[in-house]
Image (cartoon, helix red, strand yellow):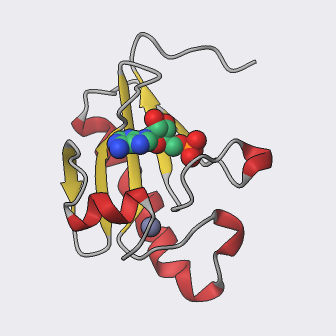
Amino acid sequence: MSECIFCKILAGDIPSTKVFEDDQLYVFKDIYPKADVHLLVIPKQHIARLDEVRAEHADLLSHMMLSLPQLAKSQGLDTGFRTIINTGPGGGQEVDHLHIHILGGSNLPGFK
Ligand code: AMP
Ligand code: ZN
């Protein structure tokens, strides 16, 4: 069985607060939110990191990106939102399953 905690969430072995899912994506609330709204968008396919993405993943990545505005809107983020992808230890990635953070709301920390 996979040791990946996000694969365990996908399998239902670890609980999560689901916001959305389709055949390619699963979206849930970050357990330690860094802002009023903090979602994680993950592919159902296990891809560890952005620097392991290949051309064959182009449609999946496109689908993830195109889903972001509607997901943000569904959380009331009408004036905009922040997206983050951490990659590898140098990028602060803690969970080795590709994920896009969506952050927003009045408690969004500065980024300077
Ligand atoms: P990163 O540092 O980009 O790898 O982000 C990993 C994120 O996953 C962090 O923001 C964690 O708070 C979040 N996280 C870790 N475990 C869980 C979990 N079981 N459910 C929801 N979010 C989680
Ligand atoms: Zn995984």
Which is nearer the eye, 75 or 25?
25
**Residue found 39% across the figure and 53% down from its top:** 41
Q: Is residue 95 left or right of residue 16?
A: right
Residue 43 visible to the viewer: yes
Front one among 15 and 52? 15
Residue that lies at the very extreme toward the right in this rendered image: 90
State the residue in front, 22 or 47.
47
Q: In this view, does 82 lie to the left or right of 5?
A: right
Quick one: which residue is furthest to the bottom in this view? 56
Q: Where is residue 7 in the image (x, y as percent from the top left)?
A: 36, 66
Query: Where 48 sits versus 111, above or below?
Result: below
Q: Where is residue 47 in the image (x, y as percent from the top left)?
A: 53, 72
Please report the residue visible at 45 percent of the width from the left and 63 percent of the height from the top.
4
Q: Is residue 63 above or below residue 57?
A: above
Position of residue 56 measured from the top left corner of the image (x, y, whole percent)? 57, 89
- Considering the image in quadrants, where does the N terminus appear? bottom left
Q: In which quarter of the image is the C terminus?
A: top right
Q: Is residue 102 visible?
A: no
- Residue displayed at 75% across by 49% down: 89
Q: Which residue lies furthest to the top in this view?
A: 106
- Quadrant containing ligand 2 reads bottom left
Q: In this view, does 41 lie to the left or right of 112?
A: left
Q: What's the residue at 41%, 76% (across, down)?
A: 45
90 to 36, vertically: above or below: below
Percent position (x, y) of residue 3?
Answer: 44, 66
Instruction: Tell me where residue 42 sits by quadrant.
Output: bottom left
Is residue 65 positioned above or below 37 on the image?
A: below
